[in-house]
């Protein structure tokens, strides 16, 4: 994969400073536990972040939970993290504590530049100029939702995307600002659903630092009874 770099664990921070557009992968032996992930995030943060303040989410098959795709065996559709936040995290970490021995749960990536390059100009206009609602929860509470464009530009001009859509909800335009906003969102949803993503299986001890907004990411379905265990953390 052209957008993936493999580095030594002690070079992760340097690689992230040099290249904001690649997925950076390092291998830790033994695999990191929660505290180790917190320490990596703390070292990468652009402001003072004590390790014990870093929120690490454990992602593993949890059959008693029925309202989370991430904790099911199902495929996870392509999205960006923290789409409901005013400022989503510029990076996030996926650290593999234990891989799916059945071959499931591989990470999938779609570069945002590839999406923009394939989109008609009216789609880009709609995604960049219209304002859409991004929900934190699907319970009808809009308190923590965000309203803004799907596409923005980073300081250096690179495209950044904010997106999360699934069978339960698709971001709806709040203000179309003279664009074909609803049609643009429908085009994006269909394009992402049909796109052939790059697939990369993280092995035991592999940590991926991913530039959020530069890639949509998801995962393939897990194998039956999977014991895959992933730690996820946001880097601000």
Image (cartoon, rainbow, N blue to C red):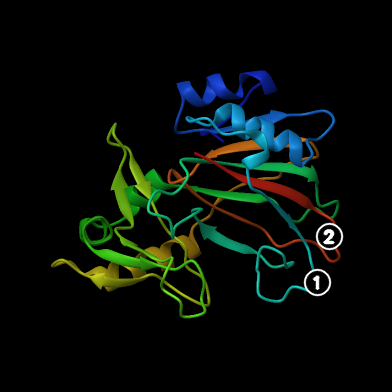
Label 1 vs label 2, nearer the camera: 1
* Rendered position, 54 above or below 141: above
Q: Tell which of 37 and 186 is nearer to you.
A: 37
Extreme residue toward the left, this view? 178
Residue 49 shown left or right of residue 135 in the figure: right
Residue 202 shown left or right of residue 179 in the figure: right
Q: Where is residue 151 in the image (x, y as percent from the top left)?
A: 31, 52
Q: Position of residue 155 (x, y in %)?
A: 29, 34
Q: For marks 1 and 2, give the CA distance.
A: 11 Å
Residue positioned 23% across, 62% down in the render: 126
Residue positioned 43% across, 55% down in the render: 85
Q: Where is residue 182 in the image (x, y as percent from the top left)?
A: 28, 73
Q: Tell which of 188 and 207 is nearer to you.
A: 207
Residue positioned 60% across, 31% down in the render: 42
Q: Residues within 10 Å of mark 1 (few under 14, many from 20)?
A: few
Circle number at residue 133 = none
Q: Which SS class for mark 1? A: loop
Q: Tell which of 165 and 37 is nearer to you.
A: 37
Residue positioned 42% across, 67% down in the render: 189
Q: Answer with the quarter of the image where residue 59 lies.
A: bottom right
Q: Which SS class for mark 2? A: loop
Residue 200 shown left or right of residue 138 in the figure: right
The mark that comes first in sequence, 1 or 2, is 1
Give the residue at mark 2. 226
Circle number at residue 63 = 1
Q: Answer with the quarter of the image where residue 200 lies.
A: top right
């Amino acid at each position: 994969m052209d957008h993936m770099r493999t580095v030594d664990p002690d070079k992760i921070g340097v690689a992230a400073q040099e290249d904001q557009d690649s997925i950076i992968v390092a291998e830790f032996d033994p695999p990191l536990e929660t505290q180790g992930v917190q320490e990596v995030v703390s070292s990468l943060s652009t402001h003072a972040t004590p390790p014990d303040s870093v929120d690490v989410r454990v992602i593993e098959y949890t059959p008693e939970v029925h309202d989370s795709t991430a904790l099911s065996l199902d495929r996870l559709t392509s999205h960006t993290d923290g789409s409901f936040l005013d400022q989503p995290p510029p990076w996030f970490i996926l650290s593999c504590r234990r891989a799916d021995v059945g071959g499931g749960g591989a990470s999938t990536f779609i570069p945002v530049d590839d999406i923009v390059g394939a989109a008609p100009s009216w789609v880009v206009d709609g995604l960049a100029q219209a304002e859409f609602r991004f929900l934190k929860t699907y319970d009808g509470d809009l308190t923590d939702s965000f309203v803004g464009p799907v596409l923005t530009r980073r300081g250096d001009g690179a495209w950044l995307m904010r997106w999360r859509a699934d069978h339960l909800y698709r971001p709806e335009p709040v203000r179309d600002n003279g664009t074909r906003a609803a049609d643009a969102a429908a085009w994006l949803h269909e394009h992402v659903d049909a796109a052939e993503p790059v697939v990369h299986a993280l092995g035991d001890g592999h940590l991926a630092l991913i530039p959020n907004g530069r890639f949509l990411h998801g995962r393939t379905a897990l194998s039956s009874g999977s014991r895959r265990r992933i730690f996820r953390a946001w880097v601000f």
